[in-house]
Amino acid sequence: MVILNNITKTYNKGNTIAVDDVSFSVGKGELFGLIGPDGAGKTSIFRVLTTLLLPDGGSATVDGCDVVIDYKKIRSQVGYMPGKFSLYQDLTVEENLNFFATIFNTTIKENYELIKEIYVQIEPFKNRRAEKLSGGMKQKLALCCALIHKPTVLFLDEPTTGVDAVSRKEFWEMLKRLKEQGITILVSTPYMDEATLCDRIALIQTGKIMSIDTPNNIVKAYSGTLYKIKSDMMNKLSNDLHSYENMLSCYAFGEYLHLSFKNENEHFEKELMNILKEKGHQQIEFERTIPTIEDCFIKLMSSSG
Amino acid sequence: MKQFLVFIKKEFYHVFRDRKTLLMLFGLPIAQIVLFGFALTNEIKNNRIVIVDYAKDLASQQIINKIEASKYFDIDKSLMSHNEIEAAFKEGKIKMAVVFPAGFNNELLHLNKSQIQLIVDASDPNTGTTLTTYISSIVMTYQTELMKNNSIPYRIVPELRMLYNPELKGAPNFVPGVMALVMMLICVMMTSVSIVKEKEKGTMEVLLVSPFRPILVIISKAVPYLLISLVNVSIILLLSVYLLDLPINGSVLLLFAESTLLIITALSLGLLISTATESQQAAMLLSMMGMMLPTVFFSGFMFPIENMPFPLQMISNLVPAKWYYIIVKSIMIKGLGFSAIWKETLILVGMTVFLLTISFRKFKIRLA
């Protein structure tokens, strides 16, 4: 449905590389996630695919149409929700929806079935101006506007950034239901915990794709053992562990530190405990843990950079 | 077509829901007309003066009647002699005394020349000068009337010689100027800001990724402001006719046609600014600096272009408002037809075509 071949995009006359030789493909009806921190190149990829930017190298097609040559066709078929999309603040919910429906040569009535589930949640506020809606409501309205013309592919650029946890969860449930209706969805997010909700994900960093697979396989592919640790003096613990020579990586993860070691012989655990007790740490919790997407990301990032 | 209409409807929602913009759009022209018409005028009305008439003959009476009829003067009282004049000034109520010498008419008829003395309170020199000018012009009118019926060149010489001040005719040159200014401000600023706003808010991205043609985005942005500007032109004209008593001597239709032309020129300029800027502030600043100042300085309604150094005169040719100002003055005040202004019209058309071509070329159908 969406195919990228060696797409490269640079800014500042080639001095800043935003997207570096990226290739991947998304199948029909797939929920595909681009996962990466701010500035990784997610938005640039979306803009190339939605024909808003011309790639400097490579080619890409959306639903069989080339993003450079057939841009007009793509523009009438896809749904796009930009990262900073804010709707028309001084228009009411209904006016916004009506406007976008008309612009896309359709009516609210015609595709009401598609947006019904989402729209019923904001319908009580249909005469309220968009600026007076909460963040979650705004996102729902924006999604309705992007869906109103029944797109074949839906591009959502960081749809959950700045939205509360409950609304985020609801939003992802909506995406799942849309997927069931056969709409291909590309979504980008900086939140690693949302990655597991996608069918397949691409981990992206500084314009390069580090890994593409299902979330499960990416986690499975994590080599080595991961531990978590906690003590009564977390700041000191981090410093002390960094000076431990057998340490491979150590970073904060929630209330714990996640650790991996260069050499795991039978004595290293005892050795570590002794060192920490010597330095005055108490109430030490130390155990193995299952890696998450974020751990995979950090590991990939440190090995590539 | 339906898309186009819904887009225009949306633009009107934007305009009418933003109170501040609305106030600026319709308050600005009214405020400017009223300000220029009443507050910022150098006409001085209803001045109290005294008359000392030693002559008491036909000529002096006729001139006094004319002075009395003028809206600029209220005759406080007629005095009998020079000595009373100083006392009247000291009371502080009068601004000027007009003295007709004995045998005024006689001298005029026999020597073909006669004099009037004007004594002015010059504590405010500007007022003083203006007042003498008013009197001089009244005397001058009387003189021409005399000459009409007679071939003898009668001359009445006011002791203070002043040249004819067109101000007395009350020809508010500023109405055409204000029209140009208001249209430049509204059209250039509003179009550029409203297009840049879509860029800034990210809605432009969505509009681009839609079947709606980018060129139609521009046109539907321009239409509402074209209509609003035409309403403004009507308001200004109504105000100037009914409030300032400035009649439209030429064709109203032609005036509106030429105004529409200037509006389109301004809209294309706004469009050009919007393609060159990324933020609303930048667009606003550029429109202010780029349009407002040159319009005020170089259109000729504040500062006469003839008095400027040659390089500045050349620059003034680039300002659309200058040509529009000439056109409006010709139609409104001189009552001329299209044949008198076709050159200026052609220049404006040329500017518009030029600006539109560049901005359509520069308008991006993509983001970068």
Image (tube, helix red, strand yellow):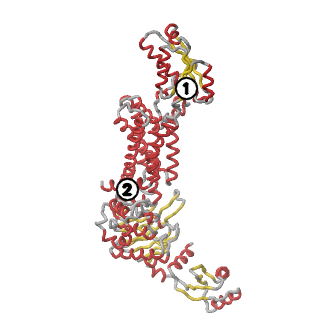
Name which residue lies at 54% across and 59% down.
A15
Res. A58 in view:
no
Residue type beneath disc 1: Ile
Label 1: few (<14), some (14–19) or many (≥20) C-alpha neighbours in 10 Å: many
Query: Count the marks: how many?
Result: 2
Residue in front for this viewpoint, A157 or B45:
B45
Q: Earlier in the sequence, mark 1 or mark 2?
A: 2
Query: Is residue A272 toward the left or the right of residue A10 in the image?
Result: right
Can you tell which mark lies on residue B10? 2
Q: Chain of mark 1?
A: B
Residue B235 in picture, x, y percent from top left: 40, 42
Residue type beneath disc 2: Lys
Query: Is residue B205 toward the left or the right of residue B125 in the image?
Result: left
Name which residue lies at 54% across and 24% down.
B77
- Badge 1 marks a residue whose secondary structure is strand
Residue in front for this viewpoint, B292 or A70:
B292
- Badge 2 marks a residue whose secondary structure is helix
Can you tell which mark lies on residue B49? 1
Label 2: few (<14), some (14–19) or many (≥20) C-alpha neighbours in 10 Å: many
**Figure quadrant of the N terminus of chain B:** bottom left
Rendered position, A34 above or below B168: below
